Image (cartoon, rainbow, N blue to C red):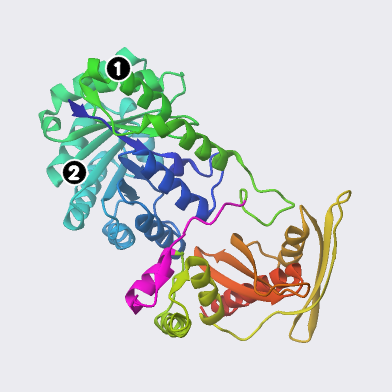
Amino acid sequence: MNEVRISDVTMKQAGKGFSLSFKEKLELSKLLDKLGVSVIELEGIEQTKIDSLRIKSVASAVKHSILAVPVALNRESVQLTWNALKEARHPRLQVVASVSPVQMEYIFHKKASAMLEAIRDTVAACCEVATDVEFVADDATRSDESFLFDAVNTAIAAGAGTITVCDTAGAMLPDEFSAFLKHLYDNVPALANVTLGISCSNALAMADACAIAGIRTGAREIKAAAYTMDNISLADVSRLLAIKGDACGVYCSVRTTEMKRIINQITWMCETGRSKNSPFDNGAHEPENDFTLTSHDDMSAVLKAVEKLGYDLSEEDGAHVWEAFRRIASRKEQISSKELDTIVASTAMQVPATYLLDSYVITSSNIISSVAHIKVKKGEEVLEGLTPGDGSIDAAFLALEQIVGCHYELDDFQIQAVTEGREAMGETLVKLRSNGKLYSGRGISTDIVGAGIQAYINALNKIVYEEAEA
């Protein structure tokens, strides 16, 4: 039997009715990898620093699936994307080009001859660095058929190993789509030597049926979504293949026994919006990294663990973290991931304080919303924020956001006791993301809310300092 690869496009939909935080994209990629999808598709690079870091982070998290990232139709984009993707275990570059006259003219601003040249040059540039290259013929069902044949032949000749044709309008019925693919096979013999992929819009509620018709015609890769908006449904197609795959002579690698639970988790992430009364983006999630280092681990292993936590440290900060790790490891055999987080927060990027806490008042009750009134000093100026929240910590962090005038993605918030008894000290760790980069701050106080405010300001000062230096 032949394998049908399922290529998930959920993350490419972000922004079309739902949003995902940086951390949630990492979680989503891990869930899809665990589910057993063959390909995970990511958004391309628009903001170089942020998007490159996102791709690198996902690449380090995904163990089994192919990671596919689109490139623009030029060599510069190919190299930039490859630099971010090359550490993935199974990297793939995608060359996406509209082949219908309308989209070619108004989206890509190219005539037919120029588009063929761009396809040839970009696919060839991708093949120079990557062994897995996909050409995506967008809006293929509304293209001039002779041009579509030329575009597919050009991409194959340049080295593309997967050719995907898209029914972007979703206007075809299953039998029409099957006939379209047969006609394509008849007129492009070279398709027999590559993998044919398909993508269908669900405008007529026929996307899943068209996917099965495409598989029966010879398609071996399907673009589907775990969180379906206008796509083939990953859950439905996987279930159909599990039941009727033998009849079609195909199978797919999706683990249907785990599918319901994982799809529910993904749906929750995509449908849970950020509350205006909470600084957390799309809900708070449990920390996903849990590991232990020992005194026998060398500097390379420690810094790799730091990278796994999500930090992108300079060489100098990496050396500071290593020295602190060695001091602590000399006194205890094992160091947990949470302890390593604290080491990074305490030693990496220690900067002059732009903001200093002046005072805070938190009002909290079981019958009224929590309210935080915080004053901070910035030089000689005293700034203050007054906001309600879903709890004391939420209100405090929102007040700080009001003071700064900027929302930073709150990646994690941890609390742990440092001492015992009535006067016990509490330690908090706050992790903020700015432009994709992770910054952590640490606070200690007998008042856990005060410790949280100190930790937030500590992380905030690192962000402000680095952005001022940039």
Relative to 229, is 51 above or below? below
Which amino acid type is shown beneath numbered disc 2?
Ala
Which is in the foreground here, disc 2 or disc 1? 1
User: From the viewer's perspective, is residue 352 above or below residue 220?
Assistant: below
Q: Quadrant of residue 190?
A: top left
Q: Amino acid at mark 1?
A: Lys
- Chain-order first, disc 2 or disc 1: 2
Tell me the quadrant of the picture where the N terminus can be found.
top left
Looking at the picture, tell me which residue is in the foreground, 415 or 113: 415
Label 2, label 1: how many angstroms apart (C-alpha)?
30 Å
Residue 225 in which image quadrant:
top left
| Image-based side of 322 in relation to 162, left or right | right
Check if residue 297 falls in the magenta segment: yes
> Is residue 333 within the magenta segment?
no
Q: Circle 2 sits in a helix, a strand or a loop, which is it?
A: loop
Asked whether, in this view, residue 384 is left or right of residue 219, the answer is right
Disc 2 packing (10 Å; few <14; some 14–19; many ≥20): many
Say which residue label 1 marks.
244
Residue 74 rendering spot, x and y as whole percentages = 29, 55
* Residue at point 53%, 57% (across, down): 287
Q: Nearer the viewer, residue 293 or 412?
A: 293
Q: Is residue 235 left or right of residue 144?
A: right
- Give the residue at x 41% y 24%: 236
Q: Position of residue 62 (x, y in %)?
A: 35, 51
The range drawn in magenta is 284-308
Which residue is the site of mark 2?
160
Compared with 148, 29 (above or below) is below
Residue 214 lies in quadrant: top left
SS category of the residue bearing label 1: helix
